[in-house]
Amino acid sequence: MNVQEYMRDLGRNARQASRQLAAATSGDKNAALLATATILDASRPALVAANAKDLESGKAKGLDAHLLDRLALTDSVIDGMIEGLRQVAALPDPCGEITDMSYRPSGIQVGKMRAPLGVVGIIYESRPNVTIDAASLCLKSGNATILRGGSEAIHSNQAIAQCIAGGLAEVGLPSAAVQVVATTDREAVGELITMAEYVDVIVPRGGKSLIERISRDAKVAVIKHLDGICHVYIDDQADLDKAFNIALNSKTHRYGVCNAMETLLVAKGVATQILPRLAEAYAEKGVELRGCEATQAIISASAATEEDWGTEYLAPVLSIRVVDDMDAAIEHISQHSSAHTESIVTENFTRARRFLAEVDSSTVMVNASTRFADGFEFGLGAEIGISTDKIHARGPVGLEGLTSQKWIVLGDGHIRQ
């Protein structure tokens, strides 16, 4: 296979399909999603058989138990894929939405219409259910998509692709609306991220090294985040029961996720009251604590280094710093945050408003766990990923984030004088 020619064929087909999708009705797109759900349900034996090949290969290659678990297409995972398709079908279609219409002095009407981005390339690792998540969001938002999954899930992804193709065919939508790259050759990624004439945006989902490489080499716009270095700041006017629950949940609800807290900031006025209580709870959960000198004077913790403040652990490890006040907390966040998610715990409304205004991250919270930074929790139904960039899509990216707006003008023979 000539990878360059193969990828460019996919690109050309996707570009043509994107034009057809732009004209598709919400009913057609929803029908394709629901048909795919039905086909997935009927194809369980084939999906499990294909997945068994990937699991066997993964074991032979020495993949650890965690990665094998992410790779597995169990009945519950397939159930989740089917439910996800149905949920996306039930979401409002953003395409064609017209807003901000107003008359100008010339007599024309000017407004904005929401429209698909066009062709979305998605690069991801391990989890084959991402194939369905990504395909469903792109299809509902009117975008053609080229999906490049990890080589470890090639058989599973191809089996899922057949189900999607069946759903598209039932409704008469083009099969190229969703294309899953059939080669495991790494050159395919290099081609996909440089085909600016065919691909409008790239969404990488995976480890930091993958995303760094794509951000560095892409000639296409990228929606991405590199790290999830999330902070919780406990203010000296916080309700300490709220603070305890939020700080515990933000860190220990799940460890290997991008919206888990990695650094806890505590105002010195309440540090002696809240830190011993939290340290005991973290110890019960097996969390290793690394703290500044002021923290170490209050609880048992190893010394935090400068590197710790900029580390996404994705593990039961937490950095803690005692700060003078909210200004010091905001300064720490501005220096060390990855612009993902930050939360303040306070009963002071003025400070809460300041924190919202001055902290420059994609999600900023008041009195809530950072674990809520998620497309489903935000009511998006699902998400294609998280963006920490300052482009049109920021934070969890759902259907609206996969569209843009164009200006529209309505006239009736108007000419400019």
Image (cartoon, grey):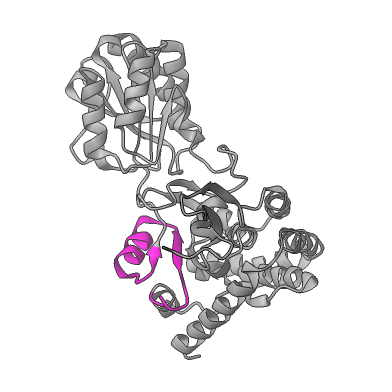
**249 lies left or right of 302:** right
Residue furthest to the front: 417
Residue drawn 73% across and 70% down? 168
398 lies above or below 140: above
Residue 235: in magenta span:
no
Q: Position of residue 20 (x, y in %)?
A: 64, 73
Residue 207: in magenta span:
yes
67 lies above or below 182: above
Q: Which residues are magenta?
A: 194-221
Q: Position of residue 160 (x, y in %)?
A: 67, 67
Q: Position of residue 309 (x, y in %)?
A: 24, 37
Residue drawn 45% across and 43% down? 256
**222 lies left or right of 72:** left
* Observer-nearest of 178 and 15: 15
Q: How many marks?
A: 0
Question: Does residue 316 appear anywhere in the picture?
Answer: no
Residue drawn 34% across and 16% down? 350
Residue 340 appears in which quarter of the rendering?
A: top left
411 lies above or below 269: below
Locate the C terminus by quadrant: bottom left
Residue 248 appears in which quarter of the rendering?
A: top left
Residue drawn 54% across and 81% down? 10
Question: Does residue 356 appear anywhere in the picture?
Answer: yes
Residue 195 appears in which quarter of the rendering?
A: bottom left
**29 lies left or right of 147:** right
Q: Position of residue 36 (x, y in %)?
A: 75, 63
